[in-house]
């Protein structure tokens, strides 16, 4: 994962921050004469997770880092590093790890019930979303949040990785976020990504009835680590890595996808709505 250079990387995080955390964890663990499995038992996680922390595949939560400090007698070193790296992220703490893993994933599958997902948002659409949720924020804060969201979307600059599969509830397409002109631009952008074969997109129509999922869901798969799910509600979110819970989330996503329009039908619907929004302007 290391880039072989210092400085600040994308998303405002030090390029070697979590890699350095992992290398120090391995060094101190081995100096203490502990295997990954032994340390994992002591800090209430699996040995494989310790291995993923050491290779920077996963980031430990702060309480895990603090327990590592106790077991390795490192005087708060790992807790302080964890706090610093989390604080350097421009993303809300509960979302920061999801964004980090998103960059490592080989595939990302999302269900969006209310809004167009962040990875697909245009600047104007993102601004309208932030202004709705933060009506008293300064222009500088809104500009910063929009810029961060667009920087995150640069993940799609890679021609094939990650594989992105999105199921959009029809609500997300019909809701006039920012007005007709903004929606015209937003749906045109989605149609362009689909036409370039950069994203597979389905629409869950109103006629499909009750969806199998009640909220936003993101599923991420990796080459050398277990899949995870990320679920988000108002002002909170969390990663799920328990295999049974991830499997249940995958099943729910599959049910939503099965009830949705085919990718071809979905693209035709989006293109027709682009024309509708032109007429509304």
Image (spheres, helix red, strand yellow):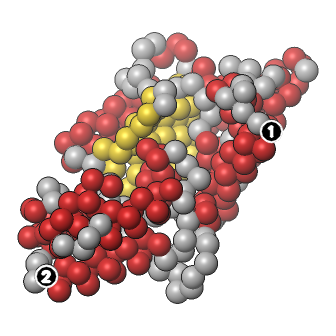
* Residue 266: image location, x then y, percent: 62, 32
Task: Name the residue at 53% across, 32% down.
Answer: 112
Q: Tell how many labels.
A: 2
Whether residue 89 sits left or right of residue 142 in the image: it is left
Q: Nearer the viewer, residue 106 or 121?
A: 121
Going from N to C along the chain, the mark reached first, 1 or 2, is: 2
Q: Where the C terminus falls, by quadrant?
A: top right
Residue under the point 15% across and 60% down? 43
Looking at the image, residue 196 sits to the left or right of residue 201; the answer is: right
Residue 59: give x, y in percent of width and height.
36, 61
Give the residue at x 54% y 74%.
15
Q: Residue at x 48, y 40 (%)?
A: 110
The residue beneath circle 2 is: 32
For residue 75, side relative to residue 139 (left or right): left
Q: Position of residue 55 (x, y in %)?
A: 34, 75
Q: Quadrant of residue 169?
A: top right
Looking at the rendered structure, the secondary structure element under dot 2 is: loop
- The disc label shown at residue 205, or none: none
Residue 102 appearing in the image: no
The reply to whether residue 7 is in sight is: yes
Which residue, given by chain and number where applicable, does mark 1 sit on? 139
Name the secondary structure under disc 1.
Answer: helix
> What is the C-alpha distance between the residues marked 1 and 2?
51 Å
Residue 133's place in the image compared with 141, above or below, is above
- Above or below, 64 relative to 125: below
Neighbours of disc 2 within 10 Å: few (<14), some (14-19), many (20+): few
């Amino acid at each position: 994962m290391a880039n072989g250079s210092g400085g600040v990387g994308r998303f405002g995080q030090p390029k070697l921050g979590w890699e350095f955390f992992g290398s120090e964890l391995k060094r101190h663990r081995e100096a203490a004469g502990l295997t990954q499995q032994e340390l994992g038992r002591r800090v209430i996680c699996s040995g494989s997770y310790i291995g993923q922390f050491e290779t920077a595949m996963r980031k430990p939560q702060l309480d895990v880092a603090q327990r590592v400090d106790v077991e390795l007698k490192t005087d708060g070193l790992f807790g302080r590093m964890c706090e610093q790296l989390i604080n350097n992220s421009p993303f809300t703490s509960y979302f920061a790890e999801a964004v980090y893993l998103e960059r490592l994933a080989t595939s990302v599958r999302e269900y969006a019930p209310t809004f167009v997902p962040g990875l697909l948002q245009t600047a104007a659409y993102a601004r309208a979303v932030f202004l709705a949720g933060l009506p008293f924020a300064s222009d500088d804060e809104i500009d910063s949040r929009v810029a961060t969201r667009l920087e995150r979307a640069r993940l799609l600059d890679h021609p094939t990785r990650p594989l992105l599969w999105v199921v959009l509830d029809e609500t997300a397409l019909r809701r006039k976020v920012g007005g007709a002109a903004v929606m015209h631009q937003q749906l045109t952008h989605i149609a362009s990504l689909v036409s370039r074969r950069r994203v597979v997109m389905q629409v869950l129509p109103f006629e499909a009835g009750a969806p199998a999922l009640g909220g936003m869901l993101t599923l991420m798969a990796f080459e050398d680590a277990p899949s995870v799910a990320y679920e988000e509600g108002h002002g909170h979110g969390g990663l799920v890595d328990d295999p049974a819970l991830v499997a249940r989330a995958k099943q729910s996503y599959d049910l939503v996808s099965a009830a949705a329009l085919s990718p071809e039908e979905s693209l035709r619907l989006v293109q027709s709505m682009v024309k509708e929004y032109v007429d509304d302007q």
